Amino acid sequence: MLKTKCEDILISSQKHQGDVRLEKKLEKVKSYILIVEDDNDINVMLKELLEQNGYEVLQAFSGTEALLHIEKRTPMAMILDLMLPGMNGEELLHKIKAENPEIAVIIASAKEDIRTRVAMLRSGVDDYITKPFDTDQLLARLEAVIRRSVSWDIKVTNSTKDMTTLKNETLQYKDIVMELEEFRVTVSGEEIKLTRREYLILELLMKNPGKVFTKNNIYESVWNEEFLGEDNAVNVHISNIRQKLAKVNSVETYIETVWGIGFKMK
């Protein structure tokens, strides 16, 4: 009983320390936000809104201008419109995810169709909000994506420091090998590129191959926020992981849908 209480206290202490580190890091990184929006009124409105809430804002009115900003200074997060002159938002997103995957991206677009939303989620965006949007909702979503991004950075940093724990540690399921020290995933020896959330979902499933995870379980474990029931993000990310695995080995089935419940490794 005493051991259990001590373990609980230790876990609570570690969690508190992690929360403090997260809050301190949030204070440091909160300032770097890039707005990519060609509508001058919306761009200026967003700039004023973010500055009033303690952010330092970089403005771009085209994809090319955004890339120039990023070359000089990498933002923590970016609010991106899809309908830009010249290089459109989707083209810019692909370039950023290829070269600067650490930048959190929120799409703010007038495109409401589900196909666009799903395509953007599969491309690695962190959130998608449609215009016109509520400014309080935008601020909440921006803070959430930054918090998730910082949480991931802390996880990587802590894991890199703890070389004794992670040295040569791997997860393996069938021909999938996940190298936890290097955050690297291979299928039949061929490396596949996963987004941050895709990696965390696959890690969760592979660490518990016999367990069925509900969408609620997965969302709250990976997104670190309450699951409200209507969000399709988990389904999209699971589908994306399946497609990436199938590109290497189309014969094998790795993730099983347990209808009415959730997902598990098959």
Image (cartoon, helix red, strand yellow):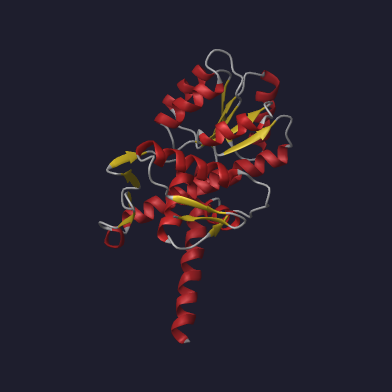
Q: Residue at x 49, y 75 (%)?
A: 9
Question: Of all residues shown, which one is farthest toward the top?
Answer: 86
Q: Quick check: 97 above or below 219? A: above
Q: Camera-side residue: 181 or 36?
A: 181
List x then y, in percent, for residue 66: 51, 22
Q: Quadrant of residue 7?
A: bottom left
Q: Camera-side residue: 263 or 217?
A: 263
List x then y, in percent, for residue 1: 48, 87
Q: Residue at x 33, y 45 (%)?
A: 184
Q: Is residue 153 left or right of residue 228?
A: left
Q: Camera-side residue: 222 or 39?
A: 222
Q: Quadrant of residue 249?
A: top left
Q: Is residue 252 left or right of residue 164?
A: right
List x then y, in percent, for residue 78: 55, 32
Q: Quick check: 112 above or below 185? A: above
Q: Quick check: 215 above or below 95? A: below
